[in-house]
Image (cartoon, rainbow, N blue to C red):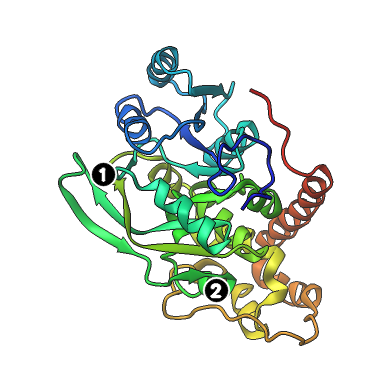
């Protein structure tokens, strides 16, 4: 772990410091609880907190400015216009000082002393992503939790990620290296509420493995008008997810590729993922003629296909630029 890229300091090379980051938009009533859960037992000497205010129109900025005046470990970055969750997360990572990153949404809460265990998991496994095993949902207080998500898979690679919609990336609140962010090309800013799911997919598709820590959890607020809830009202999840997956379609079985590009499949595949998981092509087989199949399915998908093609080309160009530039430039 001592060769992690992305700058930053580290008193002990086996336990690099963490940059906690919180994307914030119109969350004045809940963000203090999220920040308290970081500061009270999860922040260690040398760590920092970066809050990106995505042009909030309520009192969010005032709340975090007051906290920053009292705590020098908290830094604020502000977008002049609302750019969405993916852009806010990318801005935070670009400004982060340390090689390890933990994203906590502004309406969620960490369990006491939980992130240090994820840090230890990265050190012991040599992996680049560590996630909690369980998501405990709450409405008013973390002492009154309702339903729970549990990630049964111990390690998620690309194929495991495409076998079920309930994966660590869907929650978005986990620990990862800045190197994995650079290699993945960042959070997909076009993906709306699926920006964290899409980022997780990019991570595992570009060589990172997600390790799940047994017996661990964090608290996820529901019944709140969150970013995910707002965006889900506006966009089709299947189409947005397919746009994220497009650069990696050539790695799927030909039958699954055709299904994703079909009239019904490109909308429904995310909803059907548990019953119809996607399969990777066996190693060594020749790359399928993706361009020909795109043409073949063009009449059925119509304008949607053009959008997908354009997004695919843009993502490939952006990734090449990031690879040439190396780790994101850091400014305090």
> 133 above or below 45?
below
Q: Assign a secondary structure to mark 1.
A: loop
Q: Position of residue 251 (x, y in %)?
A: 69, 76
Residue receiving disc 1: 223
User: Which badge, 1 or 2, is on the more N-terminal residue?
Assistant: 1
Asked whether residue 314 appears in the rendered view, the answer is yes
Quadrant location of residue 83?
top right
Q: How many marks?
A: 2
Left or right: where 82 falls relative to 313? left
> 73 above or below 174?
above
Q: Assign a secondary structure to mark 2.
A: helix
Comparing 26 with 107, the one in front is 107
> Does the CB distance between marks 1 and 2 fall below 8 Å?
no
Q: Position of residue 54 (x, y in %)?
A: 52, 28
Whole-number angstrom distance, CA of label 1 to CA of label 2: 30 Å
Query: Residue placed at 49% from the left, 75% from the top?
Result: 163
Residue receiving disc 2: 265
Quadrant location of residue 42?
top left
Query: Residue placed at 46% from the left, 23% from the top?
Result: 56
Q: Where residue 15 is drawn, which disc sits there? A: none
Left or right: where 18 falls relative to 281? left
Q: Position of residue 112 (x, y in %)?
A: 29, 43
- Residue found farthest to the left: 144
């Amino acid at each position: 772990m001592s060769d992690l890229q992305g700058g930053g300091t580290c008193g002990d090379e086996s336990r690099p410091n963490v940059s906690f980051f919180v994307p914030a938009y119109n969350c004045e009533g809940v963000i203090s609880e999220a920040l308290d859960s970081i500061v009270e037992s999860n922040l260690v000497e040398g760590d920092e907190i970066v809050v990106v205010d995505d042009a909030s129109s309520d009192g969010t900025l005032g709340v975090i400015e007051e906290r920053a005046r009292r705590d020098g470990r908290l830094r604020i970055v502000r977008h002049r216009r609302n750019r969405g969750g993916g852009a806010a997360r990318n801005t935070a990572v670009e400004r982060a000082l340390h090689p390890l990153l933990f994203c906590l949404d502004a309406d969620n809460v960490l369990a006491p002393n939980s992130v240090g265990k994820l840090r230890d998991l990265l050190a012991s496994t040599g992996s680049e992503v560590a996630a909690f095993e369980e998501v405990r949902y709450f409405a008013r207080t973390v002492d009154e939790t309702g339903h729970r998500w549990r990630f049964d898979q111990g390690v998620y690679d690309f194929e495991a990620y495409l076998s079920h919609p309930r994966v660590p990336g869907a929650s978005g609140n986990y620990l990862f290296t800045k190197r994995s962010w650079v290699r993945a090309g960042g959070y997909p800013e076009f993906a709306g509420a699926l920006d964290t799911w899409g980022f997780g997919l990019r991570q595992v598709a570009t060589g990172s493995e997600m390790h799940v820590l047994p017996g661990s959890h964090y608290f996820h607020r529901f019944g709140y008008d969150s970013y995910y809830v707002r965006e889900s009202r506006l966009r089709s999840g299947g189409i947005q997810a397919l746009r994220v997956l497009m650069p990696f379609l050539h790695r799927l079985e030909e039958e699954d590729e055709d299904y994703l590009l079909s009239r019904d499949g490109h909308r429904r595949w995310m909803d059907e993922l548990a019953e119809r998981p996607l399969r990777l092509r066996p190693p060594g087989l020749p790359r399928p003629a993706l361009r020909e199949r795109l043409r073949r399915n063009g009449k059925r998908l119509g304008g949607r296909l053009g959008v997908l093609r354009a997004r695919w080309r843009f993502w490939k160009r952006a990734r090449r630029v990031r690879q040439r530039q190396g780790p994101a430039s850091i400014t305090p």
